[in-house]
Amino acid sequence: MTSIFIKEINAFFSSLIGYLSILVFLLLTGLFLFVFPDTSLLHQPFATLDPLFDIAPLIFIFLIPAITMRSLSEEWSNNTFELIATKPLRKSEIIMGKYFAALTLVLFSILPTILYYYTMHHLGSPVGNLDSGAIWGSFLGLFFLGAVFTSIGILASSLSRNQIVAFLFAAALCFFMYYGFYYISSLPIFTGNLDLFIQSLGIDHHYASISRGVIDTRDVIYYLSAIVFFLAISHYNILQGK
């Protein structure tokens, strides 16, 4: 797995993919947080990073599929997967190496945004007037969100030789997993506790929960289960020869 991980990391940063991914995420969040007046932190009545955690999932819906779309699709289209398969590696190690490499790039995109916390910490009146617990919980939720989206991206890449198809499928599935269950639960046919149950199937429900600053084991189990589920399907696709 380590060899695949290093190979993928080198591929990301030997081209513009890695740098552009980080730059695009920081540029978009920077515009929303400091330039656009409706979401600018400088126009908020109190020190908060809520706009960052509101807009970041929407950016990730398109950014992470762009990062992962080549992971397996490129191997299929270039007929190089068979070459990788001849090495002493299990199929699961190939998937996990590619998954953790993409997730590392996502983490590198998130880490610089900690500077936004530092900025708001000093802009608060008095200095440090922030709900730090909720903010760090939101950062953790954002990382888990990125981890689930990355597993979805790997799944999409395992399904198609065409990178554009993989990107579109991953973006659509990420959008559905984040927003879809909420909109389904709002249909009038679901009443009582059924609508709450359907909402709990969506990522946004658990993202909002962990963003309160309280680490609930149910949220962690949900994220880990979703990651394992999508990677397991990817593994099955590879075993079936796609």
Image (tube, rainbow, N blue to C red):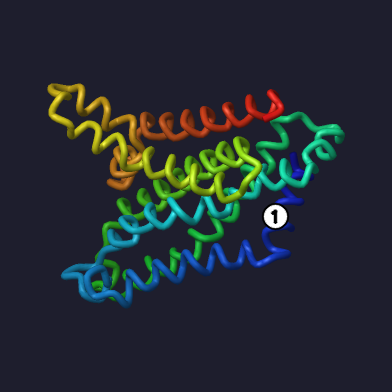
In the depicted structure, whether residue 239 falls above or below residue 159: above
Q: Which residue is mark 1?
A: 9
Quarter of the image that includes the N terminus: top right
Residue 113 rendering spot, x and y as whole percentages: 44, 65
| 45 relative to 137 in the view: left or right | left
Q: Residue at x 57, y 67 (%)?
A: 20
| 106 relative to 6 in the view: left or right | left
Q: Amino acid at mark 1?
A: Ile
Q: Residue at x 48, y 40 (%)?
A: 148
Quarter of the image that includes the C terminus: top right
Q: Residue at x 26, y 32 (%)?
A: 199
Tell me the quarter of the picture where residue 187 sits. Answer: top left
* Residue count near mark 1 (Cα–Cα under 10 Å), binned few <14, some 14–19, many ≥20: some
In the depicted structure, whether residue 140 falls above or below residue 30: above
Label 1: element kind: helix
| 161 relative to 46 in the view: left or right | right
Q: Nearer the viewer, residue 115 or 24?
A: 24
Residue 107 rendering spot, x and y as whole percentages: 54, 54
Tell me the quarter of the picture where residue 194 sits. Answer: top left
Q: Residue at x 59, y 55 (%)?
A: 105
In the depicted structure, whether residue 134 falls above or below residue 32: above
Residue 74 rendering spot, x and y as whole percentages: 70, 47
In the depicted structure, whether residue 206 falls above or below residue 57: above
Residue 208 rendering spot, x and y as whole percentages: 29, 44
